[in-house]
Image (cartoon, grey):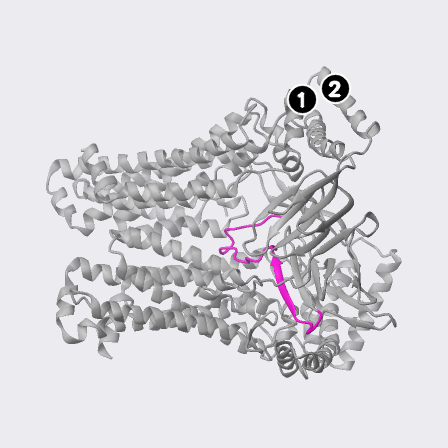
């Protein structure tokens, strides 16, 4: 019967295709979102890997000596070349971790990116949730919709055995799917950044400073995986119960989905969601291990911090688990009773017990335990060290300059008369950072600290039309009703603080220098390409498709445009 | 029109739908309440009865009684005097940080902070608004002649539009704006409407196909084509009814939680709508937002209907609708984008008009033969075009379908 029921759900009702489609979407999503990292690591990966290779593992007296010696050599004996400053950045990450690990952490240096990606995010996996709900509803609703339930209930095998088999398939599917979808993420992380040194303590991750769980990283990850597997089973049981109660696939699917979505919308950033006797907490899982989390800011009253996540005490966690297990069993039992109509056999008191259980389940669930471009002029670009900030350009005997105070661009002619080039009466969205003049076109670049993107616009000096050339700032404001949250932390603020040193526009390309590299951006399709690395802040020039720049050792580098 | 009534009765006037509606309205209220509880927490200046102490709330109410209504010279003078008195004390730095029963909130800094954030700054914004707006209009007037001389028709037209829409503004009415801001921002009720529409529309075609009723309906003269159009009409009626119902409900909930005073207050009295091109009161703006939501929902339910018609499996319908809602919402997120490709995504998404409040925070428009056309008209035109296109395709499909299954 197990094989027949499985065949009915996965093959006949095409359950396997839905799962395959959702799994493919999950793979795409995982690859697209990537992993947790730090810009200092990303930009200096090779140096970082060298350091991890050298100092990774338990911090010993020998390593302390080596790290301190490296610190002295970098900060006191350095000659200031670009190669050294990149090495310094990679070392900063290691040294920061070393200081933390020595004082508060687990006493080991390790590459934390993979572990952070697993343990520091409690976002719901909607692909998994949908697939579990679909399979659970298919199991029972198809019988009701085709009126096969009457036939099934007329035989002894069909009445009891079929119900048990269906529940077994549903819960097993919940567990297997949960494991499968999590494995996709874990394998990706393993392949992308590795999950090494799993034996280090959980407090080796800075976010877990002060955690009450004295367990290793691999054990913590395993615990999260198991909790999510149990969450999958619980969700399957709840969805099956709803399917039996509602009898229609459309209602079963949507009500089950809502029962996960609504608590998530209500408690997306708080710890209350973990207490609700519903699968939400188990499907999120990571928060059970988190300590108190704080958000800080400098206000008029000075430095303030606010607790944004209250840790879940161990007894509460154990209590929640016990309640969840009881509810999962109750849901399976009720599902069996309702589908097989077994309550007719019990009659009298037992019937009332069933009714009371249903009401208790409903009350418990609801209440909770706790609360385009045309270049006419040939492009020439020349920049020297003194004017690298591009805030002034000569134009027809006068000068075009940025007015920081009013965030506008002013043309001052030879008689000293000023003309405002930006005629928009409304304030600009971002501060103007660089300008570049080519022929009778004045380009200006805007960027700010809260966004990684840039916006380049062009003023035509003939008719003063102001048109967009390129924009990579974050434009999408949709937060999916609070499900997509964007937390800006200190790292991303520093990351976004990388200013554009200079830029120019040439045909369909924009060239710009940020930090140590020159990037080429295709205006038509937005494709970005790093055309030179290890570039110093010295002179750079461009003529007839050839870009000249000075590299980290002060030697001339050349890039020929394709 | 009896067929319309029958369709509405069959698909919407059902016990299960009423139960779902009641449950979702309860949840909607719960969401609003949760949002209310979180308002003002963290580093925000927002104040509600929930987070304020007894003293703070009484002081706030007293000040509102004193300063609410038209902003007069006398009121501004009194407010500035009070503010300066506290400011001088705070600036000196020798004020007491201990509990002081003679103060209104219990603390001197508490009095100062409340007066500054809830009254002085908002009134200052209103008083200075006219001058700043006049400057903006003056610059726009200068721009008109400047661009005309250069032959730039579009910019001249845009500035003429600014002069027309922004001239003579004087928002001298002061009321608490928190409730109105929350009402304009609140969007969870859209999710509730989606859910009910999904529950109603999914079985609409599927159930008739499953029970074989479709064959009987299609044998009748009226049933072949008129019947499906009536189905779509019933979707529109239900969508409009739900949007209006939730709009009224949200208004009542927000009024109860925050208090919605000053319905005549101009929209630009709210600082985030400082540059809005609309010269409407906040209550009129809420009606406009509701109307835009009705148009958006009509577009959304048409596509829900098409999905329900095209696919024969409930699970496929659910997945496709889920994907459609996700993609549509994502596209609508670009409503204020400046990249043409992003704008295009927002234009084709029927969900864009649900974000009407965002669209009206500033002025944006595009060039048509040297004329400035605000983006709202583009969005409306795009939606009408898409709807007409869908209906045309359905009509063509209905004519050419070999089984004569209608649309």
Q: Is residue B298 visible?
A: no
**Residue neighbourhood size for the residue with mark 2, other residues' Cα within 10 Å, grouped as few (<14), some (14–19), many (≥20):** some
Instruction: Work out which quarter of the rendered image holds the N terminus of chain B and state it.
Output: bottom left
Q: How many marks?
A: 2
Q: Is residue A319 above or below residue B53?
A: above
Q: In the visual, does A276 lie left or right of A553?
A: left
Q: From the image, which quarter does the C terminus of chain B lie in? A: bottom left
Q: Which class describes the residues within 10 Å of circle 1: few (<14), some (14-19), or many (20+)? A: many
Name the residue nearer the viewer: B4 or A96: A96
Q: Which residue is mark 1?
A: A55
Name which quarter of the figure residue A464 lies in: bottom right
Q: Is residue A327 left or right of residue A154?
A: right
Which SS class for mark 2? helix
**Residue sitting at 68 percent across and 70 percent down?**
A426
x, y (%) of residue B148?
Answer: 68, 82
Q: At 56% from the left edge and 37% from the top edge, which residue is drawn?
A: A120
Closer to the chain start, of discs 2 and 1, is: 1
Chain ID of residue with mark 1: A
Compute the Cα span from label 2 to label 1.
8 Å
Which residue does the image show at 41% across and 73% down from the upper left? B384
Query: Could you say which quadrant of the image residue B322 lies in?
Result: bottom left
Pinpoint residue A20: horizontal percent, then vertical percent.
34, 41
Towards the viewer: A486 or A378: A378
What is the number of the mark on residue A66? 2
Mark 2 and mark 1 in contact? Answer it, CB < 8 Å: yes
Magenta part of the chain? A461-488
């Amino acid at each position: 019967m197990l094989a027949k029921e499985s065949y009915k759900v996965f093959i006949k009702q095409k359950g396997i295709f839905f799962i395959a489609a959702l799994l493919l979407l999950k793979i795409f999503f995982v690859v697209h979102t990537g992993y947790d990292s730090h810009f200092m690591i990303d930009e200096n990966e090779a140096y970082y890997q060298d350091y991890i290779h050298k100092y990774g593992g338990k911090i010993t007296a020998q390593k302390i000596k080596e790290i301190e010696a490296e610190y002295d050599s970098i900060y006191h004996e350095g000659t200031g070349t670009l190669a050294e400053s990149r090495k310094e950045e990679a070392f900063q990450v290691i040294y920061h971790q070393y200081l933390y690990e020595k004082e508060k952490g687990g006493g080991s240096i390790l590459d934390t990116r993979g572990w952070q990606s697993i343990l520091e995010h409690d976002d719901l996996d909607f692909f998994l949730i949908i697939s579990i709900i679909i399979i659970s509803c298919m199991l029972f609703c198809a019988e009701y919709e085709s009126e096969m339930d009457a036939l099934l209930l007329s035989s002894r095998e069909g009445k009891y055995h079929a119900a048990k088999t269906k529940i077994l398939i549903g819960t097993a599917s919940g567990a297997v799917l949960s494991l499968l979808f999590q494995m996709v993420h874990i394998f990706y992380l393993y392949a992308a950044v590795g999950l090494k040194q799993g034996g280090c303590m959980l407090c080796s991750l800075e976010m877990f400073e002060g955690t009450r769980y004295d367990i290793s990283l691999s054990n913590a990850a395993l615990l999260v995986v198991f909790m999510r597997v149990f969450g999958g089973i619980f969700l399957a049981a709840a969805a099956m119960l709803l399917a039996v109660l509602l009898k229609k696939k459309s209602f079963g699917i949507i009500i089950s989905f809502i029962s996960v979505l609504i608590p998530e919308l209500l408690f997306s950033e708080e710890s209350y969601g973990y207490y609700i006797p519903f699968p939400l907490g188990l499907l999120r899982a990571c928060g059970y291990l988190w300590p108190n989390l704080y958000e800080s800011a400098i206000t008029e009253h000075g430095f303030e911090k606010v607790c944004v996540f209250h840790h879940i005490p161990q007894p509460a966690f154990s209590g929640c688990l016990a309640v969840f297990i009881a509810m999962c069993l109750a849901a399976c039992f009720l599902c069996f009773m309702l589908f097989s109509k077994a309550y007719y056999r019990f009659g009298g008191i037992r019937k009332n017990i069933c009714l009371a259980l249903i009401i208790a389940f409903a009350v418990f669930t609801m209440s909770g335990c706790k609360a385009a471009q045309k270049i006419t002029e040939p492009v020439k670009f020349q920049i020297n060290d003194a004017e690298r900030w591009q805030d002034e350009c000569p134009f027809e005997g006068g000068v075009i300059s940025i007015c920081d105070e009013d965030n506008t661009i002013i043309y001052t002619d030879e008689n000293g008369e000023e003309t405002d080039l930006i005629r928009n009466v409304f304030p600009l969205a971002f501060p103007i950072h660089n300008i570049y003049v080519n022929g009778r076109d004045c380009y200006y670049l805007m960027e700010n600290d809260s966004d990684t993107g840039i916006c380049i616009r062009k003023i035509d000096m003939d008719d003063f039309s102001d048109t967009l050339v390129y924009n990579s700032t974050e434009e999408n404001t949709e937060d999916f009703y609070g499900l997509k949250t964007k937390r800006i932390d200190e790292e991303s603020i520093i990351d976004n603080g990388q200013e554009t040193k200079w830029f120019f526009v040439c045909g369909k390309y924009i060239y710009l220098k940020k930090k140590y590299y020159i990037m080429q951006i295709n205006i038509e399709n937005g494709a970005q390409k790093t055309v030179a690395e290890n570039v110093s802040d010295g002179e750079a020039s461009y003529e007839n498709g050839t870009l000249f720049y000075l590299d980290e050792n002060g030697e001339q580098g050349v890039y020929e445009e394709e | 029109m009896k067929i319309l009534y029958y369709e509405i009765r069959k698909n919407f006037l059902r016990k299960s739908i009423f139960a779902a509606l009641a449950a979702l309205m309860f949840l909607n209220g719960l969401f609003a309440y949760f949002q209310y509880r979180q308002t003002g927490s963290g580093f925000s200046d927002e104040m509600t009865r929930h987070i304020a102490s007894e003293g703070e709330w009484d002081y706030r109410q007293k000040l509102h009684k004193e300063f609410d209504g038209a902003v007069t010279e006398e009121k501004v003078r009194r407010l500035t005097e009070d503010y300066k008195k506290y400011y001088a004390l705070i600036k000196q730095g020798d004020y007491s940080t201990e509990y002081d029963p003679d103060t209104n909130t219990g603390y001197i800094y508490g009095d100062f902070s409340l007066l500054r954030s809830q009254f002085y700054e908002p009134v200052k914004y209103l008083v200075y608004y006219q001058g700043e707006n006049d400057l903006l209009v003056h610059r726009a007037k200068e721009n008109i002649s400047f661009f005309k001389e250069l032959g730039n028709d579009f910019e001249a037209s845009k500035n003429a539009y600014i002069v027309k829409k922004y001239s003579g503004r004087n928002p001298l009415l002061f009321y608490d704006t928190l409730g109105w801001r929350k009402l304009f921002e609140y969007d969870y009720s859209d999710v509730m409407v989606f859910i009910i529409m999904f529950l109603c529309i999914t079985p609409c075609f599927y159930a008739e196909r499953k029970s074989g009723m479709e064959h009987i309906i299609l044998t009748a003269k009226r049933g072949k084509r008129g019947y499906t159009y009536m189905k779509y009409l019933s979707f529109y009626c239900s969508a409009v009814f739900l949007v209006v119902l939730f709009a009224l409900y949200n208004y009542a909930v927000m009024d109860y939680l925050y208090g919605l005073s000053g319905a005549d207050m101009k929209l630009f009295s709210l600082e985030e709508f400082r540059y809005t091109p609309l010269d409407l009161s906040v209550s009129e703006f809420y009606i406009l937002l509701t109307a835009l939501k009705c148009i958006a929902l009509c577009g959304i339910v048409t596509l829900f209907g098409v999905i329900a018609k095209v696919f024969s499996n409930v699970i496929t319908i659910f997945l496709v609708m889920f994907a459609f809602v996700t993609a549509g919402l994502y596209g609508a997120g670009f409503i204020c984008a400046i990249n043409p490709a992003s704008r295009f995504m927002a234009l084709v998404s029927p969900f864009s008009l649900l974000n009407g409040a965002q669209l009206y925070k500033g002025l944006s428009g595009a060039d048509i033969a040297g004329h400035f056309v605000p983006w709202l008209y583009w969005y409306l035109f795009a939606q009408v075009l898409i709807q007409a296109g869908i209906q045309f395709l359905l009509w063509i499909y209905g004519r050419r379908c070999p089984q004569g299954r209608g649309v």
